[in-house]
Image: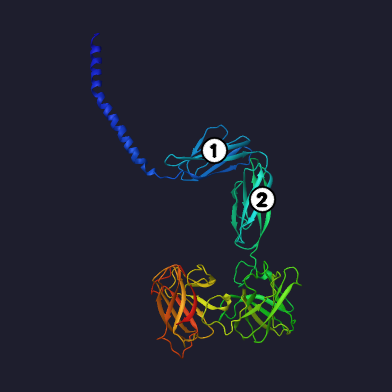
């Protein structure tokens, strides 16, 4: 009986010793496979960015419980860990989650640690102020955004404040925007007016401190004035006197040099004073640094009438200057120039215009539009070749059509063959038809007696695309055209269009039409082109 258990024990030891090497080999294989699998599973993490742009938004309940919500944010983050700064246990959260913690009253440094998928970390420290007293000494700073009449930024400071909220007064149902001290909140208004900006400062108590500031959003009137803006209050800046009445109306004669939508009607009632006129107040004094003259598009029921333009100081009407111009067209738009050279040493911010000055009112109606500074040059017989687009835009009759958006702009590339100041820009808008183009009218028909070639300086973002130049009569059509390909991209070059064999000497060609990338059925792609210096060349 005593020897049998010993024999069984010896047999078990022998069996275990036999399988032990196999167990070691199996364990080694599992470890190798695990390491190989781990290497394969983590290879994708190579090159992952270190966590960055970390922040921690602190929001404290106002029930004196000290409950604080801390919302982390950052880039390239897989996991957040926070040390609340009060010797409590740390906590973890995933992106999109937040922490909730109960503090005692005091000032704490919460340390947020962000970890990416590679295990790399970055930390951010946010001061947490827990106070059951209301904030004190609230100071709100509202700053206009330079160059944008409709935008402001708001920031605030206050003692004991843990955070702030702001509403901008444009929408009664607007959700307040939270922000922290040291941050600013930007806002853009959709219209002019007076708005109440309300900033509330929070602490850990139920009491808050707030400040309300009225913000006046204005879109000041400055030259040039085309009366087309939907955000400028032209009416408030305009007055009339002496029996004259001015008002904005739809253009009653959108033709010739003025096809714009809105103009100013000037009605001089029967018996109106000889000096009846209208006033337009500008938002700032006129800058005469570059141009000393002012041009106005005018529509008059009669030729030979005196139109007086008077400039006045904004506060002292005794500081003034006035120039007369005479209408030459009847029931059609024309440009009147008023040269104030010699009078530009004063500050003027009021424009006063008088139609048929010196005569009592007879119930006549005139119109004016597009007030802008000019070089004061008389156009003589009007626009004729060569055309360099250096006169005020109002001097030219042009139009982009069928999806071409054309405007006279500053030269974006004053280099090479074209260092002039202003050029014609045309955008062939997305989806526009292939024959979208721009026409420019001339008041004097093109004179082909010496040459049949027209040169145009062009700037194209694409090389080897066809540019079509057509000439025709404004009334009867009769178009002839020549195609020439561009040879460079993003550079000025002169394209020459030879009409020698196409010209009808008896025909009056007084409209020039240009098409960029004139390829049948190829829709516009939003490309921007420029052209300038249309002239006859040998």
**Along the line of sight, which residue is nearer the eye, 520 or 513?**
513
Q: In the structure shown, which secondary structural element does the residue marked by tag 1 occupy?
A: strand
Question: Is 343 drawn above or below residue 77 in the view shown?
Answer: below
Q: Is residue 324 left or right of residue 459?
A: right
**Residue 507 placed where, x, y %?**
46, 89
Outermost residue, bottom side: 506
Residue at point 39%, 43% (across, down): 45
**Residue 297 placed where, x, y %?**
61, 78
**Residue 422 placed where, x, y %?**
54, 72
Label 2: few (<14), some or many (≥20) within 10 Å?
many
Q: Earlier in the sequence, mark 2 or mark 1?
A: 1
Q: Is residue 375 visible?
A: yes
- Disc 2 and disc 1: Cα gap in Å? 28 Å
Residue linked to disc 1: 111
Residue 193 position by quadrant: bottom right
Instruction: Kindly identify which numbered label has been placed on residue 140.
Output: 2
């Amino acid at each position: 009986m005593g020897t049998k258990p010993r024999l069984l024990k010896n047999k078990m030891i022998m069996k275990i010793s036999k399988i032990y090497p196999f167990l070691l080999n199996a364990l080694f294989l599992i470890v190798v496979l695990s390491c190989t699998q781990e290497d394969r599973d983590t290879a994708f993490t190579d090159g992952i960015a270190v966590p960055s742009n970390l922040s921690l938004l602190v929001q404290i309940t106002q029930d004196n419980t000290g409950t604080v919500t801390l919302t982390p944010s950052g880039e390239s983050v897989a996991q957040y860990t926070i040390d609340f700064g009060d010797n409590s246990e740390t906590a973890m959260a995933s992106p999109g989650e937040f922490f909730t913690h109960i503090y005692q009253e005091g000032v704490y440094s919460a340390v947020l640690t962000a970890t990416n998928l590679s295990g790399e970390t970055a930390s951010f420290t946010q001061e947490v102020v827990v106070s059951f007293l209301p904030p004190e000494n609230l100071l709100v700073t509202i700053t206009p955004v330079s160059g944008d009449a409709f935008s402001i930024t708001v920031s605030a400071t206050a003692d004991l404040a843990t955070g702030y909220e702001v509403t901008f007064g444009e929408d009664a149902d607007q959700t307040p925007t939270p922000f922290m001290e040291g941050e600013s909140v930007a806002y853009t208004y959709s219209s002019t007016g007076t708005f109440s900006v309300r900033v509330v400062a929070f602490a850990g108590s139920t009491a808050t401190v707030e400040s309300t500031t009225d913000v006046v959003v204005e879109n000041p009137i400055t030259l040039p004035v085309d009366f087309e803006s939907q955000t400028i209050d032209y009416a408030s800046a305009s007055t009339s006197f002496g029996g004259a009445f001015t008002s904005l109306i739809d253009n009653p004669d959108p033709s010739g040099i003025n096809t714009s939508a809105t103009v100013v009607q000037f009605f001089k009632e029967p018996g109106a004073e000889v000096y009846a006129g209208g006033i337009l107040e500008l938002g700032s004094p006129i800058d005469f640094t570059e141009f000393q003259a002012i041009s106005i598009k005018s529509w008059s029921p009669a030729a030979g009438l005196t139109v007086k333009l008077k400039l006045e100081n904004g506060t002292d009407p005794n500081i003034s200057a006035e120039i007369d111009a005479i209408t030459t067209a009847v029931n059609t738009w024309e440009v009147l120039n008023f040269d104030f050279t010699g009078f530009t040493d004063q500050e003027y911010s009021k424009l006063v215009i008088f139609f048929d000055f010196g005569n009592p009112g007879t119930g006549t109606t005139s119109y004016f539009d597009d007030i802008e500074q000019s070089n004061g040059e008389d156009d003589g017989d009007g626009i004729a070749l060569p055309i360099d687009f250096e006169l005020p835009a109002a001097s030219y009759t042009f139009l982009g059509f069928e999806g071409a958006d054309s405007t006279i702009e500053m030269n974006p590339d004053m280099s090479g063959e074209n260092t002039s100041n202003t050029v014609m820009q045309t955008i062939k808008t997305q989806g526009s038809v292939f024959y979208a183009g721009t026409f420019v009218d001339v008041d004097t028909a093109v004179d082909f007696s010496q040459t049949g070639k027209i040169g145009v300086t062009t700037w194209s973002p694409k090389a080897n695309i066809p540019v079509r130049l057509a000439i025709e009569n404004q009334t009867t059509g009769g178009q002839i055209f020549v195609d020439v390909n561009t040879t460079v991209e993003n550079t000025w070059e002169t394209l020459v269009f030879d009409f020698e064999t196409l010209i009808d000497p008896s025909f009056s060609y007084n409209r020039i039409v240009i098409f960029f990338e004139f390829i049948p059925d190829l829709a516009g792609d939003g490309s921007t082109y420029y052209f300038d210096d249309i002239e006859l060349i040998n």
